[in-house]
Image (spheres, rainbow, N blue to C red):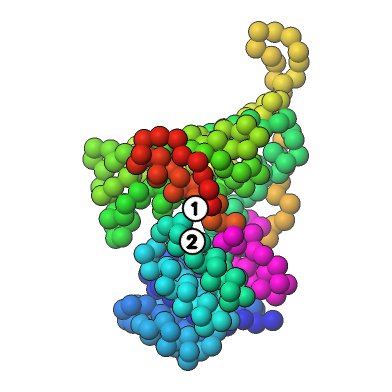
Amino acid sequence: MTYTAVLCGCGAMAKGWLKALQTSPSLRDSVTIVGLVDLDRANADNLASEFDLGGVETGSDLAAVLAATRPDILLDIVVPGARRDVVATGLAHGCHVLSEKPMATSLEEARQLLALAESAGRLHAIVQNRRFVAGVRRVRRMVEEGALGRLTGLHCDFFLAPHFGGFREQMDHVLLLDMAIHTFDAARFISGKTPLAVYCQESNPPGSWYRHGAAANAIFEFSDDVVFTYRGSWCAEGAATSWESAWRIIGTKGTLLWDGGDSFEANVVAGSDGFLRPVKPVQIPPPEDDADIHGHASVIEDFVTAIGTGSRPETDSSDNIISLAMVFGAIDSARNQGRVTIAA
C-alpha cells in the first residue's frame, strides 16, 4: 500500500528524512510526499526542487496544505517549541504523525499529545533513530541473552564539540533536551529496565558557545538495582567520542565495552581463583534483522508498517514519553540540586 505524506519543517534536518525516503526501496514504494510546509515558503519550494518533488503542494500554512492534500501521514520536523501545535494540527486532520525528537518541550505537553493521538485514533511516534543503530541492537541482544550475567550497570561518556549555529545554541538545557535523550533512550532499550530516579548536575562550561546547559553528569536508578550513569558535554574540544557515546556495560559475569562505532570488547570470568579472576573474551552477537539497523529509514519503515498492521511502532510516543521523563527528571534534579523521582 502507498501512503501520502506532508512534511512540515524544511530546514537541514528535513534533508535527512527525504534521503531516507528516497533511498530505502520499501519507502520509495510505500510513501509519496504530496506537500511541504515551512514558515518561509521559499524553504519548502527550494526543498521540493532539490529533491525533485515536482507537483507537490508547498506553503507556510500547515492546516491549509493538509486540507488541500488530505495526506495519511504528517512528518513533523519543526523546532521543539512548535511541536505541540503541529502535531495537534496533524492529528485533527486525520494524519498519523511521526515527529522529530524531543516529543515535547514539557511532560505536560507530551501527555496532551498522547491524549490527542488516542482520541483521534491515530499513531504518534518519535524518530528515536539511535535505536536503529547496529551497535545498539547488538549490545541489547547480548544483554538479553545473558552473556554478561545479570545486568548491574550501564555507564557512558558523550564528549563532542559541534558548532551548530541556529536554535540549538539558544536553547535552555541544550545537551539534556536535544541530545542526551538519544543516550537515555538507548540505555532503556539496551537494559530493558524502567527508570525510577535521577540525580543530575548541569553546567555551561567556560568557553561554551551555547547559551545554557552544554554539559551534564547524571546518575539514574533503574529497576532491578541497575545503575545508569551519563557524563556528557557538547563543548568538549580535542577528543571526541562517537555520537552514540562510549559505553561500559557490566554484569555479574563480565563487562562489555563499546566505543559507539565498530569497536567492541567483551570479557567474562573464566575461573574461580586468584586475587583478580581470569577472564576470557566472548563474541558480540550480530543484530537479528538487517532491516533494523538503518537509522531514520528503519524508524520510518517501522512506523509505516505499524499503520498497515494496526500495531504500535517501536518508538511510539506512549513509550518515548518514558525517555522524555528521564530528560525532564534530570533537568529538575539539576535545577533543584537533589534526587528526583521519574514519572511519565
SS class of the residue under badge 1? helix
Residue corresponding to mark 1: 324
The answer to if 296 sits in the magenta stretch is yes
Residue 24 lies, in percent from the top left, at: 61, 69
Instruction: Indicate which disc, 1 or 2, sits on the residue closer to the N terminus.
Output: 2
Pick the residue in front: 18 or 275.
Answer: 275
- The residue located at (47%, 91%) in the rendering is 68
Q: Position of residue 4 (x, y in %)?
A: 57, 83
Q: Which residues are magenta?
A: 292-318
Left or right for 101, reference 44: right
Q: Are marks 1 and 2 in contact (CB under 8 Å)?
A: yes
Quarter holding the N terminus?
Answer: bottom right
Q: Tell me the residue at 52%/83% (across/down).
A: 93
Residue 117 x/y as whole percent = 56, 71
Q: Main secondary structure of the magenta part?
A: helix
Tag shown at residue 136: none
Q: Is residue 1 visible?
A: yes
Q: Which mark is residue 110?
A: 2
Residue 109 position within the rendered picture, expressed as x and y whole percent measured from the top left: 45, 62
Residue type at mark 2 is Ala
